[in-house]
Amino acid sequence: MAANPTDIREEGLSVAPGSAPASGTPIRQSNLWKDAWRRYIRNRGAVVAGVIFVLVVLYCVIWPFVSPYSGNEVDFTLAKQDPSFSHPLGTDKFGRDLFTRTADGGRVSILIGFGATLAILLIGVVYGSISGFVGGRLDNGLMRFLDALYGLPYLPFAIITLAIIGRTDMWTMMVALSIASWFTTARIVRGQVLTLKENDYVRAAKAVGARWHRILVRHILPNTLGVLIIAIFLELPAVILGEAFLSFIGLGISPPDASWGAMAQEGRTTYRTHPIEIVVPSIAIASLVLCANFIADGLRDALDPRTRET
Amino acid sequence: MALLEVDDLRTHFFTREGTVRAVDGISFAVEKGKTLGIVGESGCGKSVTALSIMGLIPKPPAKIVTGSVMYEGRDLTKLSEHELEDVRGREIAMIFQDPMTSLNPTLTIGTQITETIRRHYDVPQAQANKKAVELLEEVRIPRADERLKDYPHRFSGGMRQRVMIAIALSCDPKLLIADEPTTALDVTVQASVLDLLDDLRHEHDMAMIIITHDMGVVAEAADDILVMYAGQIVEHASTLDLFDNPEHPYTEALLGALPQLEGEGIRQGRLTAIPGRPPDLIDPPAACRFGPRCPYAGGDSCTEQMPELRELRKGHWVRSAHPASERVRSEVPA
């Protein structure tokens, strides 16, 4: 049957004979992501935080390739120099260029941060969506297990995990930190799945024969994306802080390898005579954590219009 | 043999407060190519009936206690979830009340149509796309091939319901269950969607169950009408017979509550409402469930035991001790 324009009563505007201009001229498409972007860039704090965050990450990734120095090269003749043109942040007690070493340490810290966050998301999404989607007794069991894990303090849990693995490097740090902190993400995902699976379009999809995996992957998980993106920037600072803390108390990355926490630990011994050694990594940690929190805040307002601009 | 035969279906909800007898022993049949209307007020069990046929009732707490749903010789209540998934969409499709929330906002409507097609038929994407365009044209959506790439928020309520109809029709089901398909739409759009459904039903040679609380909707669309009250069928007749000679006091009251615009002996003044409220479906009374609201009840068997659903005349079934044609003059209330 041909489309008969005059039959479409509720679409009169765009198809009424004679009102042709509507066809062809693209109407400005507004979708979730464009809207979210517009709302995000209106939040000045979040934009500044985002720019700083990107700059810090780029600096950590690129500078070690560009730098004339190596972050691990010891030269006692250059020890404890103050900032100068050749060493923008000076050198530490082993004569290593701090500007280069901070980038080196940042690479490790940020890599651990993102790696562990990714693992947290993976575990959290799988655990949370199974729990929420299956529901009933399984959901109850999984959630009570989670409640029990919640009772364990975060850092001791990570320390014990490290002790059990018996080896400390970047990879084991990621494992330990993600095992100790996936609970919140799992809960968030479960809550989302629980509400989303009652949606009319899930029922409508079932009514035309969609199977459960299709419903989960196509209709439920994509709708949790906004919440997951926020979760990334909430977990990231927690993980980076956790890494810094573990390295600072000597249970994480150990010298000569650098991470911001390990650098602060080394700088601790000279904080009276040469404080820049502890100040630089501390500022680096603080700036990244602060920025991530601002970004999470901005994203939350941008992706969930209901909570925006009170 | 009828396409769908529901026999003594009972769907109960087991809640903490007690067992809710949402559907309590209903039987009916839908013939090939015919339309059955199910009418009743909110909470009378019409939607649960539809969901029970589809196997979509939430279990727990709901459960089909007894009864069978025979579809082409197969009892749908006995099928596994996996087998049911193959029936849904392919054999029996369903459209829901609220088109604004029945489409996934994160997928284009093209995706949502073609996914249904490819769920049931092994065809390449290009062919599914072509079929989707045809379907959208069939439900009279202009510029169908362009609109395939649009997300649901770019469609009005009426158009979304058309898209839902297109999705429901995508696998040529033999039975379409429409659960209040026009309730969420405004009146002019309602009429066009009903026209569309009726046209498509003839073209596709589908049977249809249309569920509504709007007598006007079933009057136009249905061949037979089933009036439900408190989980039971109280009257079952052909549309003409039901509107011309309603037998059950509840049906009479429903028709009396409709505004009349024309005709001889047109009622004047206020519309008549039905006094009282439907009974609680947890432990409903053993007597006639309409008894407390019935103007004719009192002093006879129907206050103690449930009247049977009986065939008053050919094809006209009533569950009442006081059908209109058996009443004596003295029974008419003051």
Image: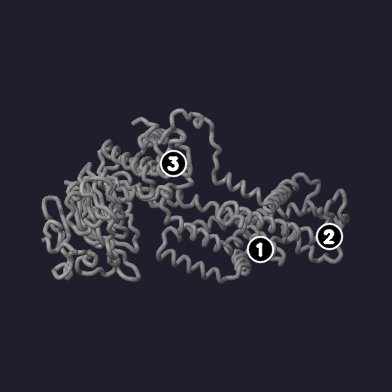
Q: CA gap, disc 1 to disc 3?
A: 45 Å
Q: Which mark is residue A93?
A: 2
Q: Position of residue B284 (x, y in %)?
A: 25, 68
Question: Relative to B154, is B185 on the left or the right?
Answer: left
Q: Which mark is residue A181?
A: none
At x 38%, y 52%, the residue is: A203
Question: Relative to A25, is A47 on the left or the right?
Answer: right
Q: Position of residue B261 (x, y in %)?
A: 28, 47
Q: Position of residue B7 (x, y in %)?
A: 20, 56
Packing grade of label 3 (10 A; few <14, some 14-19, many >=20) is many
Quadrant in which residue A152 is drawn? bottom right
At x 38%, y 41%, the residue is: B162
Q: Position of residue B324 (x, y in %)?
A: 15, 57
Q: Which residue lies under the disc numbered 1?
A: A242
Q: Which mark is residue B109?
A: 3
Is B102 above or below relative to A2? below
Subunit of label 1: A
Residues B69 and B256: in front is B256
Give the number of the mark in front: 1 or 2.
Answer: 1
Residue A127 seen by the camera: no
At x 62%, y 46%, the residue is: A38
Give the number of the mark in front: 1 or 3.
Answer: 3
Packing grade of label 1 (10 A; few <14, some 14-19, many >=20) is many
The quadrant the C terminus of chain B occupies is bottom left
Subunit of label 2: A
Residues B300 and A217: in front is B300
Chain-order first, disc 1 or disc 2: 2
Element type where label 3 sits in the image: helix
Look at label 3 and name its amino acid: Ile
